[in-house]
């Protein structure tokens, strides 16, 4: 509710101006202190970020609500100002976005697992976790043998290990379909069921497809069947242009983040694989947009690996390129993460995320360094991640006064 | 939504007691640091306020949501505990309140501009911004020539420069009427349109009035026509007495703030033009009420002028009279603002507003001075301005326990 009203109000108050905003997301940047009391942010040698902290407002944000560990989807939607409790993005879509799959308005996508079936019973839901190269070959085999079920076009996309994605393209397909998955091993197959009369065709096609997959793979030792979960259509979200009047661009090295940005109507700019590539892309496109989402992936990846030292290095590397971002003189620069990924936990967590906002209208002077502790005591206080986009617009002079 | 639920709960829990609350609002008090890192609050020599800070809880408040710059209406409603997203006060009403116009339950008011029309085209929406004395004479001419349109009584009230207010009094008038204003110059006149069948009479009367105004003023060189905007009836808000069981009084030198207080059922006490006058009024009425809203206007005015030094002086002046307020021994004293008006921005802003709460039940001891930075790190944290009234009641012993 809150964000629905908020976005309506922001839509009424936002105006188009020439000012430029950069949202620099260090994925999973928040962490926990090690035995020396240092988090990667605190341990990193990051002179530019710390000197920027003196000229900025610090705070910490919560993506969903306190105690909730957000996935990448909710984490980013919240940063973009979309209440993740209102806009729930289907797993199939997220998986498809992560594989750079184009999903059209008539398509339904589902995430799929290779599985092992014996006498109608699913004995391994992951088919012994095959290597990705191995499962990729089976996906290619399926692509060759199965191109259509009835009037619905079928496309397969290989993923990691036992995972792949199926896209169904045709008329009259809706996504209110239960998972075709017994959920537990040693149970007979559960077929897809429509949860709504509109979705009957989709459930029927899904089950027919699974039977055909079973037929094509019947002689495979382990990958002799598949499960389908998270049927979803492309969600309809209001765009950055509609709500914020922003011409927004996304610069990200990983497909899932490009996909999330695309959901909210950002333009995806092709870039390379490193942070330096991303900054070159930013420079080259500086005059074409007024909002840039720049995504740094590796802080999260090393957090997930439990690799404190490498996470520190990614932060230090980001600090080096920050010089080039500042040289572009953005009117507003926000540095934050989408969630915390503490190295000792090797996973996303619920801990608040450090936030830095820089503009010429900041209540600066309280903090000297950018880390979890200074952010917890910063002038911004503890805010919702949903507050960030309105704050960015305000600092950029893009929001008119509310009421007389 | 939130405040509706809140106000229902507060209504159930609030009790009448003898304790007294003072809400001292320094309008627009929050600011940004200057080159020496000082805000007006930090720069001001205010020994009483700072010594009070040691005995109080500090925090900072947000009137609407982060990033939103509130007008005076939403800013004050929020301080009074009324969600400004739920209670949207029409521009016509606010303008009327600002001119001390009495608006009855059957009246509709609209704000009006003198304009210049030529061959049916509005060539100047502000009629060359006449001096207030000049336009006042034209308002007097209209008052003399036009007293009624059909069965509706018309009253004109002069305002600043090209602005004035029209009150329509009669049966069957509703305010769902579009502005009679082309919005842009060089466009033909746009007449008022009813947005709802109930409001047809109001639209018709408004257009008839404008034609008569055009007739009366046809020989004027510039002020030869008028535009009407923000048609509004008096909104129906639950009162302080109903929700909080408070007998509340307002002491304010400017009519708009008296009007806002009246909207929530406060008694308006006549006062003079200075802060000292306001304190004399407070003393003289101390035994008659249990809640006093005392409004200091000039902190905002000097913020709007970009005059840092004069804003400092108003704070110092407020500090001097604070001695007299404390001598009355209020059970609860809150010192805050309705929004920030940073001198370098010369306008209202979205920045959080410093809050000080003093009572004998405070978690005191964390802060030594009252300024934006100490408030950001105060024991209260960052709160919604909607939290202030419940906190005031709690500290005054006027709220019972919720649940057993």
Image (cartoon, coloured by chain):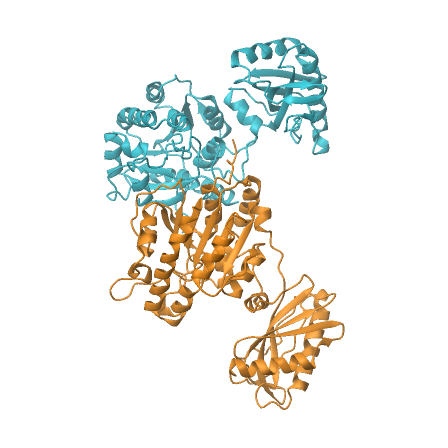
Chain colours: A orange, B cyan
Total marks in image:
0
> In the image, is residue A302 above or below residue A7?
below
> In the image, is residue A119 above or below residue A387?
below
Percent of width and height locating residue B339: 42, 35
Percent of width and height locating residue A326: 40, 49
Percent of width and height locating residue B288: 38, 23
Q: Relative to B287, is A89 on the left or the right?
A: right
Splitting the image into 4 quarters, where does residue B212 fall? top right
Q: Residue at x 69, y 33 (%)?
A: B195
> In the image, is residue B206 above or below residue A402?
above
Task: In the displayed orientation, state which residue is furthest to the right.
Answer: A151
User: Nearest the camera: B223 or B365?
Assistant: B223
User: Nearest the camera: A273 or B223?
Assistant: A273
Percent of width and height locating residue A210: 66, 80
Q: Relative to B264, is A102 on the left or the right?
A: right
> In the image, is residue A146 above or below residue B65?
below
Can you see residue B122?
Answer: yes
Q: Residue at x 66, y 82 (%)?
A: A213
Can you see residue B403?
Answer: no
User: Nearest the camera: B101 or B20?
Assistant: B101
Q: Residue at x 37, y 50 (%)?
A: A59
């Amino acid at each position: 509710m809150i964000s629905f009203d908020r976005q309506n109000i922001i839509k009424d108050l936002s105006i188009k101006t020439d000012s430029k905003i950069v949202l620099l997301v260090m994925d999973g940047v928040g962490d926990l202190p090690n035995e020396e009391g240092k988090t990667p942010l605190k341990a990193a040698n990051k002179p530019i970020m710390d000197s920027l902290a003196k000229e900025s407002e610090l705070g910490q944000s919560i993506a969903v609500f306190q105690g909730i560990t957000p996935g990448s989807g909710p984490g980013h939607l919240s940063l973009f100002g979309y209440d993740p409790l209102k806009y729930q993005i289907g797993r199939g879509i997220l998986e498809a976005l992560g594989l750079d799959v184009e999903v059209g308005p008539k398509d339904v996508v589902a995430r799929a697992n290779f599985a092992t079936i014996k006498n109608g019973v699913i004995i391994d839901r992951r088919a012994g976790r095959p290597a990705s190269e191995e499962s990729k070959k089976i996906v290619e085999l399926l692509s060759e043998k199965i191109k259509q079920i009835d009037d619905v076009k079928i496309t397969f996309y290989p993923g990691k290990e036992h995972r792949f994605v199926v896209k169904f393209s045709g008329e009259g397909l809706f996504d209110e379909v239960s998972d075709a998955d017994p959920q537990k091993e040693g149970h007979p197959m559960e077929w897809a069921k429509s949860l709504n009369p509109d979705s009957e065709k989709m459930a029927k096609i899904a089950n027919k497809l699974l039977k055909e997959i079973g037929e094509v793979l019947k002689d495979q030792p382990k990958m002799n069947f598949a499960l389908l979960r998270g049927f979803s259509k492309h969600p309809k979200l209001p765009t950055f242009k509609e709500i914020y009047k922003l011409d927004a661009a996304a610069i990200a090295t990983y497909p899932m983040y490009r996909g999330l940005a695309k959901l909210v109507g950002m333009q995806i700019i092709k870039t390379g694989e490193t942070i330096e590539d991303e900054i070159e892309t930013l420079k080259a496109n500086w005059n074409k947009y007024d909002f840039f989402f720049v995504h740094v992936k590796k802080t999260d990846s090393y957090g997930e690996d439990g690799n404190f030292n490498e996470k520190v290095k990614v932060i230090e590397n980001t600090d080096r390129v920050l010089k080039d971002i500042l040289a572009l003189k953005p009117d507003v620069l926000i540095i934050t993460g989408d969630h915390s990924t503490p190295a000792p936990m090797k996973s996303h967590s619920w801990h608040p995320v450090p936030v830095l906002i820089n503009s010429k209208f900041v209540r600066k002077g309280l903090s000297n360094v950018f880390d979890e502790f200074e952010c917890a005591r910063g002038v911004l206080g503890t805010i919702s991640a949903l507050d960030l986009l309105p704050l960015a617009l305000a600092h950029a002079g893009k929001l008119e006064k509310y009421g007389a």
